[in-house]
Image: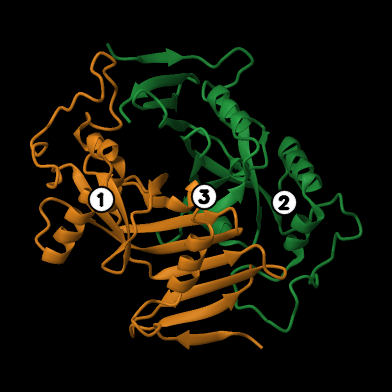
Chain colours: A green, B orange
Amino acid sequence: MSDSVPSPSAPGGLPPWRSPLSRALHRNRSRPYSRYFQLATVTPQGRPANRTVVFRGFALGQLTFVTDQRSAKVADIAANPWGQACWYFTQTREQFRLMGPLTLVTAAEEDGDRQQARHTSWQALSDAAKCQFYWPPPGVVRDLDAPLDTPLDTTNALDPTVPPPTFCLGLLQPTLVDHLELRGNPQNRTQYAYLDDGTWHTTVINP
Amino acid sequence: MSDSVPSPSAPGGLPPWRSPLSRALHRNRSRPYSRYFQLATVTPQGRPANRTVVFRGFALGQLTFVTDQRSAKVADIAANPWGQACWYFTQTREQFRLMGPLTLVTAAEEDGDRQQARHTSWQALSDAAKCQFYWPPPGVVRDLDAPLDTPLDTTNALDPTVPPPTFCLGLLQPTLVDHLELRGNPQNRTQYAYLDDGTWHTTVINP
C-alpha cells in the first residue's frame, strides 16, 4: 500500500501543511529557535547562500521575514526569486522544509494589500530592530570610529509608524513542503506539493 | 579607522575562524542545536535547497557530515559543488555562515586519507544511525506495508566496521566565513576570506 492522494486545501483555504506547522510552533513555543528559520537562496553567481531569519508570522498566506534593502539576500532574490526555509524544532525533533517563490515588498510597492502588510510588519518591530534599518550598509567594511547606533538616515524617524526606504518585507510562498518527524516509528516524512490545478497533493515518502 | 588586515593562519595551521567557532561550540555544548547546522546547496534546476545535518566534527581540516548516496543532496553536489552551512547558537546569540566547496567521499574513493576518514565516520555512528543506510531509498513514495527497519541490503551487515555503499562522508572546505555576534555593542560581524596566496584575510564589517 502506498499513500499518495490528492488532498484539497482544508476548509477555510489553509494548505494541508499549515496544521502540522502550527502544531510544531505551539509545542515548541517556549524555545527561542521556534522563532526563526534558515533561509537558503542562490546568489547571482549561482552559489548557495544561507542565513537565519526571524519568522514574522503569516501575511497574505505566506511566511514573512524582514530584511534590509541593502542586504545581500535582496540581490540574491532579484537574480533568482526562489527560497527554501529550513525549520528544525529541537523539542519535538521535527523539520519543515518550505520551498517556493520569494518576493520582496519595498517602499515602491503599489499593491495596497502588500504595502499594508509591509507597514504592519514595521509597526510590530521592536525599537531595537527598527534602529538597524538606519545603520550604515550591512556587509561593508566597518568604520570603527562611527558607532552603529548613530543613525545615518532619519528620514522617517520623526514618524515611527512609517518604515524607512531600507525596510523590506520578504514573503515566501511555499509550493513544496517536506515534513520530517524523527520521533516516528521509526520515522515519518510527508511531502506536500502544490499543483497547477490549485490543489495540494500529499505523499508519504521514505525518510 | 577601518579594520581590514591580512591574518595568516594561526600557529599550527588553523584558520582564524576556528578559534571563535570552537569557543561557540564549547559555550553551547549542552544545547542540542550545537550538534547540527543547516546546509544550503543548489539543485540541478538551479533552485536553493536547505536541510539540517548533524555536525560530525572536523576531518582533513574540513567540516564533516554524513549522507546517503541516494539522497537529493548528492545530486545537488554533483551538479554544483558548493555549499553554505548556517550555524546559529541560541545560547550565545551568534551565527557562523561557512561557504566553500563540497565534496563527497564514496565507496569508490581512491585517496587513502579520505577513504580512511569515511571509515572512521562510519564507525563513530550509533547503531540507529547506521540502520538508516539500509533503509529503502529516501524521498520516494513509502510502502507502508514494508517496515523501514527491515533492511533491504545487508551486504556489509556482517561486518559493522565496513560502511555500506550507500554511506557517504560529506566534506565542506570553508573559504568564506561570516561570524555575526548579536550580543556585541551593539553587534559585531567579522568576515574571514581565504585568498589565492593561501592566507586568510579578516575584515570587520557592518552587521
- Residue A78 makes an appearance in the image: no
Residue B119 falls left or right of residue B34 = left
Q: Amino acid at mark 1?
A: Ala
The residues tagged by marks 1 and 2 sit, at their Cα atoms, a distance apart of 54 Å
Which image quadrant is residue A148 in? Answer: bottom right
Q: Which mark is residue B207?
A: none
Q: Position of residue A11 (x, y in %)?
A: 61, 12
The residues tagged by marks 1 and 3 sit, at their Cα atoms, a distance apart of 20 Å
Q: Which mark is residue B31?
A: 3
Q: Are marks 1 and 2 in contact (CB under 8 Å)?
A: no
Q: Amino acid at mark 2?
A: Ala
Q: Is residue B81 above or below residue A122?
A: below
Query: Dot 1, crowdedness within 10 Å: few (<14), some or many (≥20)?
Result: few
> Which sits earlier in the primary sequence, circle 1 or circle 3?
3
| Mark 1 residue element | helix
| Residue at which label 2 appears | A108
Residue A97 falls left or right of residue B55 = right
Q: Is residue A140 above or below residue A26?
A: below
| Mark 2 residue element | loop
Query: Dot 2, crowdedness within 10 Å: few (<14), some or many (≥20)?
Result: few
- Residue at 66 percent across and 88 percent down: it is B1
Q: Position of residue A18 (x, y in %)?
A: 57, 25
Chain bearing mark 2: A
Residues at marks 1 and 2 on the same chain: no
Residues at marks 1 and 3 on the same chain: yes
| Residue at which label 1 appears | B124
